[in-house]
Amino acid sequence: MENQTVNEGKTMAIISHLWIIGLIIAFFMNNSKKNSFASFYIKQMIGLNLIQLLNGWIIYKFVGMTAGSIVGILLLVLWVISLIGAVKGEEKTIPVVGDQFQEWFKNI
């Protein structure tokens, strides 16, 4: 990836990791001037936030608190992996589901 593209998109990529509010801010910042690096991480965080919401709504209520807590810890680990990639300026997909997020949200 071109270094200038990474440098321009790095701030938006990091902001997208700041839960829903940061994701919304990064999304609108990226709409005015599309940056492929920022878009990559916005897609990753949309997917991770959706899984987090589903974890809270479904797993905790129907499977149990222990399973929901385990999923929550795994999501935290995936979030940290993604944040480290954004800070380093590398497009690092979230293990297991990251490629799927890129496909699902390809129009963003």
Image (spheres, grey):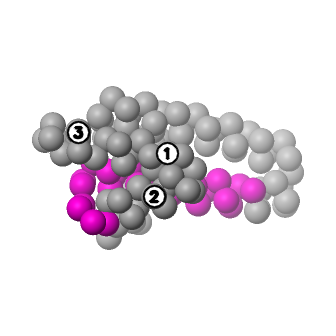
Crowd band around label 1 with a 10 angstrom C-alpha radius: few (<14), some (14–19), many (20+): many
Secondary structure found at label 2: helix
In-image side of 62 versus 7 (left or right): right
Identify the residue under disc 2: 25
Q: Is the magenta stretch mostly helix, strand or loop?
A: helix
Relative to 50, residue 75 above or below: above
Which residue shows up at 61% across the image and 42% down it?
A: 75
Task: Using the numbered discs, state the Cα–Cα distance from disc 2 to disc 3 in whole angstroms.
Answer: 18 Å
In-image side of 46 versus 57 (left or right): left
Where residue 82 appears, x then y in whole percent? 45, 38
Relative to 74, residue 43 above or below: below
Please give the label number shown on residue 7. 3
Please give the label number shown on residue 32. none
Res. 86 visible in picture: yes
Q: Earlier in the sequence, mark 3 or mark 1?
A: 3
Q: What residue type is labelled 1?
A: His
Crowd band around label 3 with a 10 angstrom C-alpha radius: few (<14), some (14–19), many (20+): some
Query: Which residue occupies the extreme bottom position in the image?
Result: 107
Identify the residue under disc 1: 17
The C terminus appears in which quarter of the rendering? bottom left
Where residue 19 appears, x then y in whole percent? 57, 50
Q: Which amino acid does label 3 sit on?
A: Asn
- The residue closer to the viewer here, 98 or 10, is 10
Q: Earlier in the sequence, mark 2 or mark 3?
A: 3
Residue stretch rendered in magenta on the structure: 31-56
Where residue 78 appears, x then y in whole percent? 54, 39
Secondary structure found at label 3: helix
- The residue closer to the viewer here, 103 or 90, is 90
